[in-house]
Amino acid sequence: MSTETVTINSLGAQGDGIAHGPAGPIYVPFALPGETVAIARVKNHGTVMSTSVASPDRIQPACRHFGPEGVGGSCGGCSLQHLARPAYGAFKRSLVVAALKSKGLEPEVGPLVEAEAGERRRVVFAARRTEKGLLLGFNQAESHHIVPIEECPVISAGIFARLEAVRTIGLAAAGADAFRITVIESLTGLDVAIDGVKQLSDRQRRDVTEAVLKLRGIARVSVNGEIVIEPQKPLLDFSGVRVSPPPGAFTQATMAAEEAMARLALDHVGKAKRVADFFAGVGTFALRLARTAQVHAVESDEKALKALDHAARNTQGLKPVSVEKRDLFRRPLMVSELKTFDAVVFDPPRAGAEAQCRELARSAVKKIVAVSCNPLSLARDLAILVEGGYSIIGVTPIDQFLWTPHVEVVATLVRR
């Protein structure tokens, strides 16, 4: 380890400050461009010891757990609480611009649709049994150390108010090893999904059940995908369509971001009569689209697809919704199958939708909405579509994960 003084030149893709050293870049968490900082350096990683010149964009963090001096250690959940909003928004937008430019694409990228504190309705906690009870919090960056959470300005008030209930349930299910607790705030209460523990004993199952029956605001508890107790079906609302997701199902992390993405998709699809929704999940887009168009929803997760199908069949006023279980990474819809659709919406995992985009690039589909949580894989997919004859008419970055370097993107395309 060596100690030296460096000037921060830029922010890296993970939100770290970057200084240019003789041997290459030095990554300094919690430092901002323009700052002069003394660091303790190990290889190309620096830890701030003191700051002699601070950035005018530096602000007071919103949370006591943030930063190198955070209570209990540096919570790994946020990396950018110290950056003022204008610079923060510009940074997130720049991630999208840079990713697109790396593939030779330079469409107009809109301003960041901002997130606000207290919006996160889906949270994944790290947990471990200790002599004092259940340690519940978030892992320190690049570490298995769990920082116990005393406050969190990101998560919803509904989740934070029930953290003690979550601890009680988690403790009843805990074994010797660390595990995960995913909590979703639904319309009917918290949906608590515990993963990474051994199969529950009969005693643990009873303890979990008894704990939930004594608590308020818990809709369901599942362990490793199996429902242990479900006082009420957890429900999500997709513009008036109620869906009960299966345990551990993917949901958008905030309602505000979900609605922003859906609004962009619906506006672009417009009056299309027949729409395909790829990587449909539990119906975030499909069930909204079905208000005005026939929808074919394709998804590899059978339980998610069943939830989507059940909601569609039990909601009045929707156009027909057909569902298909299919792995679009291995078996994308071919050109011959795409010819009946006026528009396509896709929202894949971080790996993107390369195989499907290669088929879309050869199709006659008039409009495409590409949604992504990974600007790099999105840029690759958009480049395929542009080469195949599509024009990008809009790119909107959306801040779903506040104070992190993660950014959602919605891109809209038309066939030239």
Image: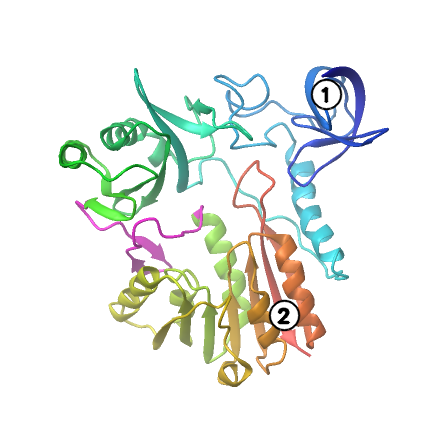
Q: Secondary structure at mark 2?
A: strand
Q: Residue at x 49, y 35 (%)?
A: 117
Badge 1, how many Cα within 10 Å: few under 14, some, many 20+? some
Of the pair 251 and 330, the residue shown nearer to us: 330
Q: Eyeballing the image, is 150 above or below 309? A: above
Which mark's residue is nearer the viewer, 2 or 1? Answer: 1
Badge 2, how many Cα within 10 Å: few under 14, some, many 20+? many
Residue 250 lies, in percent from the top left, at 40, 52
Residue 91 lies, in percent from the top left, at 69, 41
Quadrant in the rendering for residue 110: bottom right
Q: Which residue is mark 2?
A: 413
Q: Residue at x 61, y 62 (%)?
A: 411
Q: Assess whether residue 134 is covered by the magenta stretch.
A: no
Q: Is residue 391 left or right of residue 401?
A: right
Of the pair 141 and 16, the residue shown nearer to us: 141
Q: Which mark is residue 374?
A: none
Specify which label sits upstream in the sequence, 2 or 1: 1
Residue 189 lies, in percent from the top left, at 26, 42
Q: Could you tell me which quadrant the N terminus lies in? A: top right
Tell how many labels: 2
Q: Could you tell me which quadrant the C terminus lies in? A: bottom right
Q: Secondary structure at mark 1?
A: strand
Quadrant in the rendering for residue 162: top left
The type of residue carrying mark 2 is: Leu
Q: Assess whether residue 244 is covered by the magenta stretch.
A: yes
Q: Which residue is mark 1?
A: 41
Quadrant in the rendering for residue 224: top left
Residue 191 lies, in percent from the top left, at 29, 43
Residue range of the region highlighted in magenta in the rendering: 229-254
The type of residue carrying mark 1 is: Arg
Assign the magenta stretch its main secondary structure: loop
